[in-house]
Amino acid sequence: MAIVDDLSEARAVLGDLVAGAGRVVVFTGAGISTESGIPDFRSPGGIWSQREPVYFDDFLASEEARLEDWHRRFEMRCLLEDAQPNAAHRAIAGLVRSGIASHVITQNIDGLHQRSGVPEDRLIELHGNATTGGCLDCGAGMSLDEARAEMEASGHAPRCLSCGGLVKARVISFGQPMPVREMQRAEDATGDCDLFVAVGSSLVVYPAAGFPLAAKRNGATLVIVNREATEQDQVADHVLRGAIGPIFEPLDVSER
């Protein structure tokens, strides 16, 4: 394991690794989006240190929990709409569009990878997306505007307009099963890369944090880019320590 905390050296290492790779997979966590103004969930001062999450079982069982969850989604919406993709998002999108990166696997629910230009068929959202909702029974979609209008009209948490089922933001809550299709897509992409770049993740939330380890076992070079140390630093081939946007900035060709 080589730890690099000098910005120029970190940029050079990342650039050389990407240039020499045949197939890159990028894995992102909350740290990439904190530089766009979106707070993370787990660090001191993060969202979960301020209030407890709404668990999936509680959402199913309690109207009060459902209303609380929706009110939080509407609060978060303003934050997400104000945030803009940063240099790291843009650079990663460029790697995908150029064919260098096959997929982006993300733990984030903020929609910034889509807004930076990552195509839907190349994006794997393990924990869902907070910018839209859907029925837990039939899967029909519901926009946040529709959900808010339904709540304001009825005084209750929104119900599906097609089948009457519970509607929930399309995010994976604590206790909710992981999405089978997205997990399989992530497994396939991880097994098919020769460079796996983990960006802005604490790498403590499983099963998502298992993908960097799986890539390493499959023979890929593992690079971790993060501000702080992670529990997987010791198994990584390269650890690039520092602000994420500046490290990726030389790869961002969107403004050139």
Image: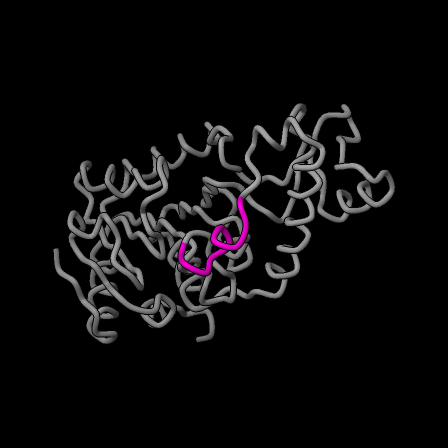
* Highlighted magenta segment, given as a residue range: 43-52
* Residue 121 spot, x, y in % from top left: 49, 42
In the displayed structure image, the side of residue 39 where residue 59 appears, left or right? right
What residue is rendered at 54% in x and 50% in y? 51
What residue is rendered at 35% in x and 66% in y? 244
By secondary structure, the bulk of the magenta-drawn segment is best described as loop
* Residue 139 spot, x, y in % from top left: 65, 29
* Residue 117 spot, x, y in % from top left: 51, 57
In the displayed structure image, the side of residue 47 where residue 3 appears, left or right? left
In the displayed structure image, the side of residue 230 where residue 189 appears, left or right? right
Kindly give the residue lying farthest to the right in the view shown: 153
Task: From the viewer's side, name the closer residue of 230 and 179.
Answer: 230
Task: From the viewer's side, name the closer residue of 195 and 43.
Answer: 43
What residue is rendered at 20% in x and 64% in y? 16
In the picture, which quadrant includes the N terminus?
bottom left
Task: From the viewer's side, name the closer residue of 38 and 66.
Answer: 66
Reply above or below: 146 against 88.
above
In the picture, which quadrant includes the C terminus?
bottom left
Scheme by which the image is coloured: one colour
In the displayed structure image, the side of residue 26 where residue 221 appears, left or right? left
- Based on the picture, tell me whether residue 48 belongs to the magenta stretch: yes
Residue 239, image quadrant: bottom left
Task: From the viewer's side, name the closer residue of 10 and 203.
Answer: 203
